[in-house]
Amino acid sequence: MDRVPPPGTLFRKIPVSKCSEDCLPGYRRIIKGGPFKCCFECAKCSKGEISNETDSSTCQRCPEDQWPNNMSQCLPKLIEALFYKDHRTVLVVAIISALFFAKSSMILGIFILFRDTPVVRANNQTLSFILLVSVMSSFLCVFFFLGYPTHVTCMLRQTSFGVIFSVAISSILAKTIIVYMAFKATKPGSIWSKFIGLKIAKCVVFCSFLQVLLSIIWLSTSPPFPERNIQLYQDKIIFQCNEGSLLAFSMLLGYIGLLAAACFIVAFLARNLPDSFNEAKNITFCMLVVCSVWVAFIPAYMSVTGVNTVLVEIFAILSSSISFLGCIFFPKCYIILVRPDLNSKHIFSKHV
């Protein structure tokens, strides 16, 4: 028998009258089996659930716009979109797009001012103007990718980019075909002389309307729409555009790739044709850059998440558009402004 402490002596340990410890916030009670119904165990709340009271018997799920902090408190999720994530990134992209749009406008003004000179008239003057307007529009379509996604911007992002690039590459393809046929037709007995009168430029540029048709079908059946992605991250809400139909988006990119590949092949074949104003070499290098950018775009686009997918596509659009200016129009502007002695029919006729 234990010895009873003498009266007035304090107990060293306070007696406990229950068989379980308190369950702290973040845990819930589970009743033990056996004869003692008042005894319980503590179990941690499941992922996405909290309990903010002691000895809570249940856990509650956080609202969709909140996430559990240590399973005891719901905190608002961070909003992630390109506009919200980093204002400086948006500002840099906007400045680059606006700057090159201004440069494209200046080049267009130079070409209009010197429209009667040989370097502008060579390789189809009209196609050069169409290409320049397309490049200018591609810099403007970047602004659809910036900021908070809406129904309008989501529908215009991919479709405007697809149509603009189709017109641009179709114009380059038409310019290259015209150069190739013109020099092949000069040989005696060449079969290319039969096709020299065809409106090749109009026929090839008409190919861009296939992209317009695809875009109309896409917007009519399964258009892109804005969505809040709450599944990708536990503590973030991603505001993004859902492409609607992945097949239509793939066909849009595939058609651009088909035109770019055809343009590269024809330009490569015409790269050594004699002409001081022959753009084939420049077009070959330009399409090599464009194809490289978009081949690298596919794995990069598939491997990133969140707003990084938007940044990858913006980079591809800007890189391709800048390559059009740098490879095709900057050399002509150099001749017009810096070496006007080369911009004459005499120089042109010497190399034909």
Image (cartoon, rainbow, N blue to C red):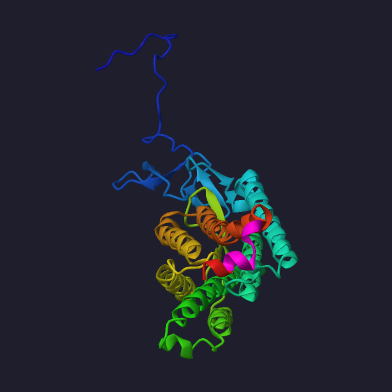
Depth check: give the residue in front, 9 or 328.
328
> Which quadrant holds residue 17?
top left
Any magenta on residue 344? yes
Would residue 272 appear left or right of 314 to someone viewing this image? left
Task: Classify the position of the N terminus by image quarter.
Answer: top left
Depth check: give the residue in front, 253 or 118.
118
Depth check: give the residue in front, 246 or 128.
128
Q: Residue 298, position in %: x, y?
A: 42, 61
**Residue found at x 52% / y 69%:** 243
Q: Is 65 rendered above or below residue 13?
A: below
Is residue 315 visible in this depiction of the protein? yes
Is residue 151 visible in this depiction of the protein? no
Q: How many marks?
A: 0
Q: Is 249 rendered above or below residue 290?
A: below
Magenta stretch mostly in which secondary structure?
Answer: helix
Instruction: Write down the region rendered in magenta.
Output: 341-348
Would residue 70 appear left or right of 112 to someone viewing this image? left
